Amino acid sequence: MKKLREKRDNDKVSLALKELKLAAESGKNLMPEFINCAKSYTTLGEMVNVLKDIYGEYIEPAQF
C-alpha cells in the first residue's frame, strides 16, 4: 500500500474521492464513481471512509 500511495497521482485520487462524495450526497448512481476511483488507484478503505462520513456505519443490534 505504501508503494501504491507513493506512485499514484494523489491529485487524481482526491478528485475521484470528491466526485464520489458529491454523487453519494446527491443520491446518484455510485458505480461510475467507484470505477473512476479504481482507475485512479484509490484504495477500498479510502472509498469506504468517504461513504461512512455520509451514510454512517451500520451496527447490528444485539438480539438474544
Image (spheres, helix red, strand yellow):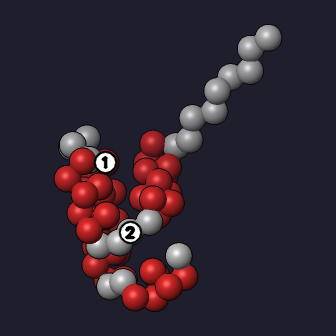
- Looking at the rendered structure, the secondary structure element under dot 1 is helix
Q: Position of residue 26 (x, y in %)?
A: 25, 46
In the image, taking residue 21 as reference, residue 35 lies left or right, namely left
In terms of image quadrants, where is residue 40?
A: bottom left
What amino acid is labelled 1 in the image?
A: Ala
The answer to whether mark 2 and mark 1 are in CB contact below 8 A is: no
Mark number displayed over residue 37: none
Q: Position of residue 59 (x, y in %)?
A: 63, 33
Q: Quadrant of the C terminus?
A: top right
Within 10 angstroms of label 2, few (less than 14), some, or many (20 or more) residues? many
Count the labels in the image: 2
In the image, taking residue 25 as reference, residue 43 lies left or right, namely right
Q: Can residue 18 be seen here?
A: no
Q: Position of residue 47 (x, y in %)?
A: 42, 58
As displayed, is residue 59 above or below residue 36? above
Front-most of residues 14 and 32: 32
Residue farthest along the right direction in this orientation: 64
Q: Position of residue 32 (x, y in %)?
A: 20, 53
In the image, taking residue 63 as reference, residue 27 lies left or right, namely left
Q: Can residue 38 be seen here?
A: yes
Give the Cα separation between the discs numbered 2 and 1.
16 Å
- Looking at the rendered structure, the secondary structure element under dot 2 is loop
As displayed, is residue 48 above or below residue 60? below
Residue assigned mark 1: 24
As displayed, is residue 4 above or below residue 41? below
What amino acid is labelled 2 in the image?
A: Thr
User: Given this view, does label 2 or label 1 mark the residue nearer the observer?
Assistant: 2
Residue assigned mark 2: 42
Q: Residue at x 64, y 27 (%)?
A: 60
Q: Residue at x 35, y 72 (%)?
A: 41
